[in-house]
Image (spheres, rainbow, N blue to C red):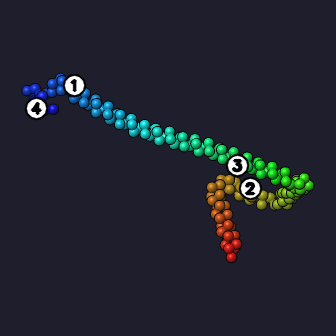
Amino acid sequence: MSDASRTHVGTPTPEELRAQVERTREELGQTVEALAHKADIKAQAQEKTAAVRKRAAEETAVVAGHVRANAHHAVQLVKDRTPDRVRDQAAQASGLVGHATARAGRLVAEHTPDSVHDRAGQAATTARANRKPLFVAGAALVVALLLVRHRHGCR
């Protein structure tokens, strides 16, 4: 505001106040518009992320379907090319192995002292309570075995 537009007392006139209010409204409107624009960008980014996730899920489903179809086809080829005599022998061997395993399990259970059963139960309970460290230890053991096997194979 300039000195010329003020009255003698130095207070703004009603027209000046209206103009000042109008300018403030315009500035506020621009600020709100800028904030809304920023919010729209965020929303757009979220929409794009959702679209990418959806597309990835669809592509994963398609690939999984192809893998299942190929696996089914491979199984069918093996079945078709395996003679009936071999399939019958495999089924028979599988049955024998199942029976032998069950019998061995019963024999071990019958001849194992109760103290060993108790200790095994305690170990199983502890393992269930501490699965994560057990999985980590198992993974470390597998990696160590693979490294040892690889070193022996490279010599």
Real-space Cα separation, disc 2 to disc 1, in angstroms: 86 Å
Q: Which residue is mark 4?
A: 3
Going by the numbered disc 1, the residue's amino acid type is: Arg
Going by the numbered disc 4, the residue's amino acid type is: Asp
| Left or right side of 148 for 75 | right
User: Alpha-carbon neighbours of circle 4 within 10 Å: few (<14), some, or many (≥20)?
Assistant: few
Q: List x then y, in percent, for residue 56.
A: 59, 45
Q: Which residue is mark 3?
A: 67
| Mark closer to the chain start, 4 or 1 | 4
Q: Which residue is mark 1?
A: 18
Q: Given this view, does label 3 or label 2 mark the residue nearer the observer?
A: 3
| Left or right side of 118 for 44 | left
User: Alpha-carbon neighbours of circle 3 within 10 Å: few (<14), some, or many (≥20)?
Assistant: few
Real-space Cα separation, disc 3 to disc 2, in angstroms: 41 Å
Q: Residue at x 65, y 69 (%)?
A: 147
Real-space Cα separation, disc 4 to disc 3, in angstroms: 83 Å
Real-space Cα separation, disc 3 to disc 1, in angstroms: 72 Å
Q: Nearer the viewer, residue 94 or 88?
A: 88
| Left or right side of 72 for 37 | left
Q: Which residue is mark 2?
A: 121
Q: Quadrant of residue 112?
A: bottom right
Give the structural element (helix, strand or loop) at label 2. Answer: helix
Q: Residue at x 77, y 51 (%)?
A: 74
| Mark closer to the chain start, 3 or 2 | 3
Q: Given this view, does label 3 or label 1 mark the residue nearer the observer?
A: 3
Q: Given this view, does label 4 or label 2 mark the residue nearer the observer?
A: 4
Give the structural element (helix, strand or loop) at label 4. Answer: helix
| Mark closer to the chain start, 3 or 1 | 1
